[in-house]
Amino acid sequence: MEKSVIIKPVGYVRSDLKERYEAPRQGTMTAATGAVIELEPGCNFEQALTGLEGFSHLWIIYIFHKNDSWKPMVTPPRNGGKKVGVFASRSPHRPNRTGLSCVKYIKHEGLNIYISGSDMLDGTPVLDIKPYLPYSDSFPEAATGWAGERVQVSYEIRVAPGAAEQAAVIKEKEGQNLLNYARVQLSVNPDDVSRKRVSIVEGNRYCLSYRKWRIYYEVDINSGTVHVSEIR
Amino acid sequence: MEKSVIIKPVGYVRSDLKERYEAPRQGTMTAATGAVIELEPGCNFEQALTGLEGFSHLWIIYIFHKNDSWKPMVTPPRNGGKKVGVFASRSPHRPNRTGLSCVKYIKHEGLNIYISGSDMLDGTPVLDIKPYLPYSDSFPEAATGWAGERVQVSYEIRVAPGAAEQAAVIKEKEGQNLLNYARVQLSVNPDDVSRKRVSIVEGNRYCLSYRKWRIYYEVDINSGTVHVSEIR
């Protein structure tokens, strides 16, 4: 019986998503976020990618490396505040910190695998890469217990020219991609003020916090649009 | 950058599948094989299962603990002998020996999770358990590159009374479940004599080897039936 297993990552993710709160709640539920998996040199991993062409999706098994602790019960989003067991959830705070994401495969070159639709943070250690096989992996009618149906509403994010300029300046000067952050955070449930970084300003005007910055936006529920009006 | 990660299994599989050559090539491609995941005591894992009721499928991330080595290129079944990269395959011989299986959830009691459709061997160390969510995990139209379509032909296994008696005696005396082995090995491609344990006797009569035992059977391609006639 193997009491502990030592795992050496086969590679690491390079991505614009730098911090935990930048990650979408489900990778495939937001617009494509590009990333690269850089495999480790000296292991013949170049060869190990032969034949990946023609697959559209890949499984990535990885470590939630920014998470240290876990609890047996978690409070998932959209469960009315009710707790469920961590093994009945996809919470990133879990024993062994093991993540599983289905991403879109774009191409590979040398030791780099280009993917999209990823929710992995920059620096994520990757344990394994497997091709997605619908005949063993796809169960569209699987029952989902407490988790219910997918939230279908995905908001379109529109950015006012002034806010886009402010974001460009901040990205240039301080390396923070606030528009990416806004897109990740606001494309689903932008008016959910139970989230700690979202507050209501007045009416349908909200503020999303990101470190020292504030992103102001209006939510148009009817058209499913978020208007980002100001970043400061 | 985490250079190595120590993983402590959350539990171990108990199953009738004892050896590597008993495992089906894809867990969900054979008739239900029952198994139990026994979680480790003293970690509050009982609680961590709360809310699993109502899910039909679970992801199990585990270690192929009977496999020690890997190579960058593998020869998968049904690829005409051509090699592909290990990351473009689901081969169990892979870096970090990481397995990923979607199994059917039956029930849990205390620290035991009852599952079916599993291809994990007895003693398999389990790293994580996650609920299957079709809206993030199911892509029925995913492209499969070299792997092509699922082989649809699944043979029905019929066992002659004499052979069933022989199997019962062997199970009783030596603890080997030959009927389970025959079912696993013969429900897909029973006439594939390129496999090292299958040989042709004459006509449509074949022999499947299992340690010191021999399983004789006839294949009826038209009706999709395997008749197990003798075990000795």
Image (spheres, coloured by chain):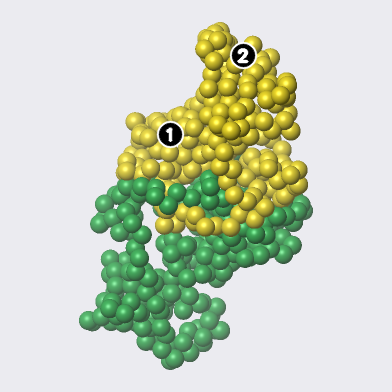
Chain colours: A green, B yellow
Q: Are marks 2 and 1 in contact (CB under 8 Å)?
A: no
Residue B27 relative to residue B145: left or right:
left
Q: Is residue A208 left or right of residue A39?
A: left
User: Label 1 crowding class (10 Å Cα cut-off): few <14, some 14-19, many 20+?
Assistant: many
Question: Which of the 4 quarters of the picture holds residue A113?
Answer: bottom right
Picture residue at 43% right of the left edge, 64% below the top: A29
Query: Which numbered circle lies on residue B115?
Result: 1
- The three-letter code of the residue at mark 2 reads Ile
- Using the image, name the chain to which the residue with label 1 belongs: B
In the rendered image, residue B114, in percent from the top left (x then y), is placed at 40, 32
The residue under the point 68% across, 63% down is A108
Residue at image x 28%, y 70%? A193
Secondary structure at numbered mark 2: strand
Which mark is drawn over residue B231? Answer: 2
Pointer 2: residues within 10 angstroms few (<14), some, or many (20+)? many
Q: Quadrant for the C terminus of chain A, please.
A: bottom left
Q: Nearer the viewer, mark 2 or mark 1?
A: 2
Work out whether residue A217 can be spotted: yes
Q: Nearer the viewer, residue B230 or B99?
A: B230
Where in the figure is residue B133, as x and y percent of width and height?
A: 41, 52
Residue A209 quadrant: bottom left
Q: Earlier in the sequence, mark 2 or mark 1?
A: 1
Taking the view exactly as shown, the residue that stands out farthest to the left is: A203
Asked if one can make out residue B121 in the rendered structure from this viewpoint, the answer is no
Helix or strand or loop: what does disc 1 sit on? strand
Q: Amino acid at mark 1?
A: Ile
Measured as percent of width and height from the top left, residue B102 is found at 49, 43
- Residue under mark 2: which chain is it in? B
Toward the bottom, the furthest residue is A162
Quadrant position of the N terminus of chain A in the picture? top right
